[in-house]
Image (spheres, helix red, strand yellow):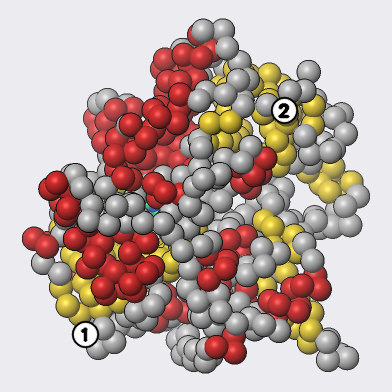
Amino acid sequence: MAVDGEGIADDRESMDFDVVVVGAGPAGLAAAIRLKQLAPDLSVVVLEKGAAVGAHILSGAVIDPSSLDELLPGWRDGDLPLMTEVTSDRFDILTRNGRLPVPNILMPPLMSNHGNLIVSLGDLCRWLGEKAEALGVEIYPGFAATEVVYNESGAVRGVATGDMGISRDGTPGPGFARGMKLLGKYVLMAEGVRGSLSERIIERFELRKGREPPKYGLGIKELWEVRPEQHRQGQVHHSFGWPLGAGTGGGSFLYHLPDNLVAVGLVVHLNYSNPYLSPFEEFQRFKTHKAIAPIFAGGKRVGYGARAISEGGWQSVPRLSFPGGLLLGCAAGLVNVPRIKGFHNASRSGMLAAEHVAAAIAAGRAGDEISAFEDSWRDSTIGQDLWRVRNVKPLWSRFGTYLGIALGGLDMWCNTLFKWSPFGTIGHSGPDHAALDPAAEHQPIQYDKPDGVLTFDRLSSVFLSNTNHEEDQPVHLHVLDPALQRQSELEVFQGPSTRYCPAAVYEWQTEADGSPRFVINAQNCVHCKTCDIKDPNQNIRWVPPQGGEGPVYPRM
Ligand SMILES: Cc1cc2nc3c(=O)[nH]c(=O)nc-3n(C[C@H](O)[C@H](O)[C@H](O)COP(=O)(O)OP(=O)(O)OC[C@H]3O[C@@H](n4cnc5c(N)ncnc54)[C@H](O)[C@@H]3O)c2cc1C
Ligand code: SF4
């Protein structure tokens, strides 16, 4: 019998499957496909909170396709989503008025994009979803898993989808429909970065014990249609430096897709210390650099979105097995940070998990802990990929952008040539939310007003993400202690949520009597999870709103 572990009456209908997968991103879909390839008779269900598969997927994306070659041999011969091969690879250091190209010869070979593909990861996930359904996987888009269901012995037994049609005051509205429980022999958590249920499972089973804290960046991206003369199909262009100061980690990407489309974005490491910093405005500034702005002259912005990216790497990956299931992909933190790549490891972790789960079910097991997964992923190409770059992020954090990147490059060369690092394995310096300084230690940053042509404000940007939430529902951004928000977030840090949120969700307004009021425009939320990560007091908790809401990203 399944019991509810979250204290809500167990009156919901339930459906039983062999395997329940939460999240239809690369990790969840690869797991579902591999399960059906290995054991066609297994029943596999995938839940996705976006309105459709791919609706919430936001990535660069230049992908290493080696995992696709393993998952679906011959896939390149079929009908393909939007993609192109990488034809050239540029890397620049930007200063305010200039750029310094880094010769490719200096780049460690693992940073090369030779053989990689520029894709819309959302399109690729839609395509993978079709492949999964063709194999008999049941995919339910528009359903957010909002609770973990545990059995009597405390193992994860399944998940429950959220109730629909609850009014803002918490009472059932006219369109009320009770959520369902989906139970499985094993549950695969593939929610992506900072997964809301994955984090609860990590906490409950102490999966981070003995590991470094998780680290994150925030990636803000736009999709542009540029003039043909500015388009270089297949070109991959990265930079670091301006507009970020030496003490703030991050970098830009510009990927030239087919159809005159260019994906442009800035990733800002979320261990920045200045509460006045606005990653959104830094990204807008980046586009005004004289080496960058001409690319967009005469072009049209057609897409916008934002998403956190996991950056902790090898040291921060929690234990990935727990009683009743496994953590996969970015919910586990498997991104290779210097390469800004997570697709290959996410999909490989799904495939590896599927192999373990199929074998366990074939052996008559159910609901136990597949402990062998831990050594298995660390010994696999996923582990090897993360091990070689394990010091890049901590060196960057400790020594700043210029010295830190140079030392990170040296470390990657040593790991490539000698399979050895002069630095051993360096730890991260604390969680990102603890990195903010009180505002009194910094000067406010003056950002230029957007021109509406090359640079934009948040609201017109959110419009392009097609984000939609029913207003009459409980706010899905929980402020745990409202008084603390005022006493600390506002009075000590001067309201950083109004700057780190890329969707203008948070505002501090002044009431008629002069008192401050924290306003949450939850309908704008693009589900990037930054508030859950960066609030200095960990006083904001992101929980999934009604299924089928949030952004509907086209070609992101
Ligand atoms: C700005 C940016 C640029 C990037 N660039 C690249 C790149 O160039 N190349 C590359 O390889 N990687 C890149 N990455 C990383 C890559 O996108 C991720 O590593 C990869 O998408 C992880 O796959 P995943 O399946 O683990 O998670 P995701 O892709 O995040 O998918 C998770 C899915 O689960 C769904 N979900 C979450 N919670 C629930 C829930 N409770 N119930 C139901 N559904 C849920 C989400 O809606 C989502 O569809 C980039 C990431 C960012 C943010
Ligand atoms: S409210 Fe939080 S999760 Fe939503 S867009 Fe803003 S920072 Fe991201």
**Residue 377 in which image quadrant:** top left
Q: Which mark is residue 444?
A: none
Where is residue 169 drawn, in percent x and y? 89, 57
Q: Are marks 1 and 2 in contact (CB under 8 Å)?
A: no
| Residue where numbered disc 1 is placed | 98
Dot 2 amino acid type: Gly
**Tag 1 secondary structure:** loop
Where is residue 85 drawn, in percent x and y? 20, 48
**Residue 104 in which image quadrant:** bottom left
Mark 1: C-beta under 8 Å from nearest atom of ligand 1: no
Q: Residues within 10 Å of mark 1 (few under 14, many from 20)?
A: few
Q: Confirm whether residue 436 shows in the render.
A: yes
Between 529 and 58, the one nearer to me in the picture? 529
Q: What's the CA distance linking mark 1 and mark 2?
A: 58 Å
Residue 277 lies left or right of residue 169; in this view the side is left
**First reached walking from the N terminus: tag 1 or tag 2:** 1
**Tag 2 secondary structure:** loop
Disc 1 versus disc 2: nearer the observer:
2
Q: Residues within 10 Å of mark 2 (few under 14, many from 20)?
A: some
- Residue at horizontal 86 percent and vertical 90 percent from the top: 512
For the N terminus, give its image quadrant.
top right
| Residue where numbered disc 2 is placed | 154
- Residue at horizontal 46 percent and vertical 45 percent from the top: 317
Dot 1 amino acid type: Gly
Between 224 and 527, the one nearer to me in the picture? 527
Mark 2: C-beta under 8 Å from nearest atom of ligand 1: no
Q: Is residue 45 above or below residue 527?
A: above
- Residue at horizontal 81 percent and vertical 73 percent from the top: 483
